[in-house]
Amino acid sequence: MKKNIVRALAPMTLVILLAGCGKGGSEAGGNAGAGKTEAVEGAEAKEAPKDIVTLSAQQVADAGIEVTRPTVGGEAGAIELSATIEGDPQGVQVVSAAVGGRLVSLTRNLGQSVGRGDPLAIIESREAASLKAEVEAARARAALAQSNLRREQRLFAERVSPEQDLVAARTAATEAGIALRLAQQQLSATGSGGGALNRIAVRSPIGGQVIARSATLGQTVAADAELFRVANLSKVTVTTSLVPNDAGRVKPGARVEVTASGRRQEGRVTFVSPVLDETTRLVPVIATLDNAGSTWRVGETVNVSILVPAGGDRTVAVPSAAVQMIEDKPFVFVRTPTGFRAMPVTLGRTNGGQVVVASGLTGSERIASTNSFTLKAELGKSAAKDED
């Protein structure tokens, strides 16, 4: 009978054991599932950095984003300011009357080209008549003195005339020649020519263009009165002024970029004044431009960038277009293997198209220098998706 009871309890004991095992397995499985869920939730909770913009190389190229390195101290900077175009001081000449008289002819007008020695006006003058008469008289005396010298030389050779007569004749011929040359030079200084005995021509001292004319036909002018102004405008100068600190960085030969209304040209600094202007207390600086194509007009105001070496420090600077304001703070987008990272920076002074970065960059980074606003927009889209 005892055997029968044991046989009846055995299946029940197995069921209880299996139930216990099932319960334990269920609890273990539940714990494993819970651990997996927590891991997934943890991964979802770990969000991607909000300062990263992921772009492929092709997307960067399609967006027109250029990548460059920041400018580090020791590389070129620029001083930007306004200036005025002026004629080359060596290429502008005032044409004046050498003698007083009446203007009977004007051969050139404003804007016309002239060559060196070309007549610009004809003056009728008593002084001109006297000068020409003196030349003729000196020429006649010189011819007579030469004739007497030849005669004395012949007589001395024939032992008819003494040597002292030959010496006197030679001296007289020399003096007459000197007097003739002096009279000719005096006439030449007035312009000479002009046709009639009482007329002289006013000639251009250089080749160029007539840029001013104060003479009027029939006008009586005094000696040394300005009649014309002629300029050779194949070269022009740019005149500006610098504060002493900036002037100390500019040397003759420094490169200059001049821009105005769609025109751009390079020149060179030719003069940096060693003294300050007494009125402005600034340093005058002059640069020269090639103007063979008549690109620039005297008197116009232009923008000038004087390229100068930066100091010997390690100042980091980036193009102004590389800086984007995000939540009222400046950022620069630094290139990464997968795109760009928005790097917060502290800005310093602006120098031309460059802005100094006081902190945030080392200068060894590669940054987005153009179209960085597209990266800012992409960053904004990512932030909006995260909020949703």
Image (tube, rainbow, N blue to C red):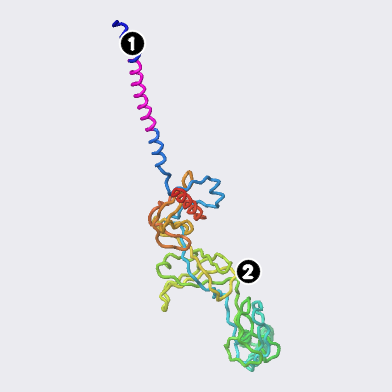
Instruction: Mark 1 or mark 2: name the one nearer the start of the chain.
Output: 1
How dense is the environment of label 2, judged by Cα within 10 Å: few (below 14), some, or many (20 and up)?
few
Give the residue drawn at x 33%, y 9%.
7
The percent position of residue 262, horizontal first and vertical second, equals 58, 67
Inspect the image, locate mark 1, and give the three-letter code of the amino acid beneath it. Answer: Ala
Closer to the camera in the image, 51 or 172: 51
Q: Can you identify the residue that label 1 sits on? A: 8
Relative to 53, say whether 33 is above or below. above
The percent position of residue 98, horizontal first and vertical second, equals 60, 87
Relative to 46, say whether 63 is above or below. below
Secondary structure of the residue carrying numbered label 1: helix
Q: Is residue 244 left or right of residue 67?
A: left
Q: Can you identify the residue that label 2 sits on? A: 293
The percent position of residue 290, horizontal first and vertical second, equals 58, 68
Q: Is residue 179 left or right of residue 304?
A: right
Residue located farthest toward the bottom when viewing the structure as drawn: 126
Give the residue drawn at x 49%, y 58%.
321
Q: Is residue 145 visible?
A: no
Secondary structure of the residue carrying numbered label 2: loop
Q: Is residue 52 left or right of residue 193?
A: left
**Mark 1 and mark 2: Cα distance apart in space:** 122 Å
Q: Which residues are magenta?
A: 13-35
The percent position of residue 275, horizontal first and vertical second, equals 42, 73
Residue located farthest toward the right when viewing the structure as drawn: 195
Image quadrant containing the N terminus:
top left
